Image (spheres, grey):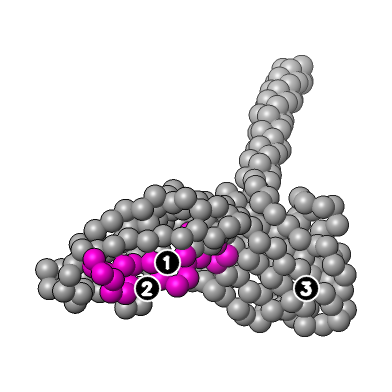
Amino acid sequence: MNSSRLFRALITGLTLLACLWFLNLVSGHHGRASQMEPVCQDVTVAITSSAPPLPDSCPPVEILSLPLAAMDNTCMDGVPTDLSCYTGMLSGGAAREYALRLKARCALRVAVEPRSEYFDVSFVLFAGGTRCVLARDENGAGQNESAVIPNLEAGVYRLIVGGYGEDCGPYLLSVRDQTPPVAQVSAAEAFRGRNGTVIHWRSFAEVDLAHFALYRMDELGRRRIAVLRAHGSPAAFADYRFTDRDLEGRATYSLEAVSLDGRIEVVPVNS
């Protein structure tokens, strides 16, 4: 009888030990799985959070029309932009950024005038967001920085005004069209002659002039009556003359200077 009870107690104990071992094995497996799950989540979050933020495509100030003349202050709004693309003297301190929208090819004159004798100004013009077109930091503190930038194609440009090192301060920015005229025309006049009306004019600095087109306005409307091919030069005067056989002499005239790239400038003709 005693041996039978002892045997049953032994079997019960072994069964309990086996159950405990099995439960411990199962709980240990779940414990390791629960420890791995947060690691995977952390990696995912880390990859997501490490993605660089998209750059802001909207600059602080947009120049809608030229000319521009405006007071501003680089201490008011810092633009973290590297300005060292040109001379190595420019630095990425506090700056102001402007968007220039050019509707046609032209030249620009950019001038920055510091309003503090201690402020050393500089500026950089970018095309396509990152291509450096031109930058200026040639003078010291309290002195102006300016440049004429020729042959800028139509499009959007970034103009960034800053200072040397970490300088900031007030300044006057001016941006204006510096595209030279097709031709500088003077003494354009019409006068009565023996055989009709003589239209005469003189031009200077014909840089890319293709031709002159002469128009007559009368009761029949506006008509082109002559095309005179350019024969001047960039550094000399040239004379042009045309005789209109309108014997009544009641017409008025206008002159157009047409460039090689299609630009047209209207020149008044004095009667």
Which residue matches tag 2? 189
Which image quarter: residue 172? bottom right
Bin the neighbour count of mark 1 within 10 Å (Cα to Cα): few under 14, some 14-19, many 20 and up.
some
* Magenta highlight on residue 256: no
Count of labels shown?
3
The x, y position of residue 179, in whole percent, is 54, 62
Quick one: SS at disc 3? loop
Asked whether the viewer can see residue 152, the reply is no
Q: Sequence order check: which comes first, mark 2 or mark 3?
A: 3
Circles 2 and 1, Cβ within 8 Å, touching? The answer is yes
Amino acid under disc 2: Glu
Element under label 2? strand
N-terminal of the pair, mark 3 or mark 1, is 3
User: Magenta stretch?
Assistant: 177-202
Q: Position of residue 137 (x, y in %)?
A: 81, 62
Instruction: Give the residue displayed 55% in from the left and 66% down from the top.
Output: 177
Q: Position of residue 217 (x, y in %)?
A: 21, 70
Labelled disc at residue 201: 1
Q: Secondary structure at mark 1?
A: strand
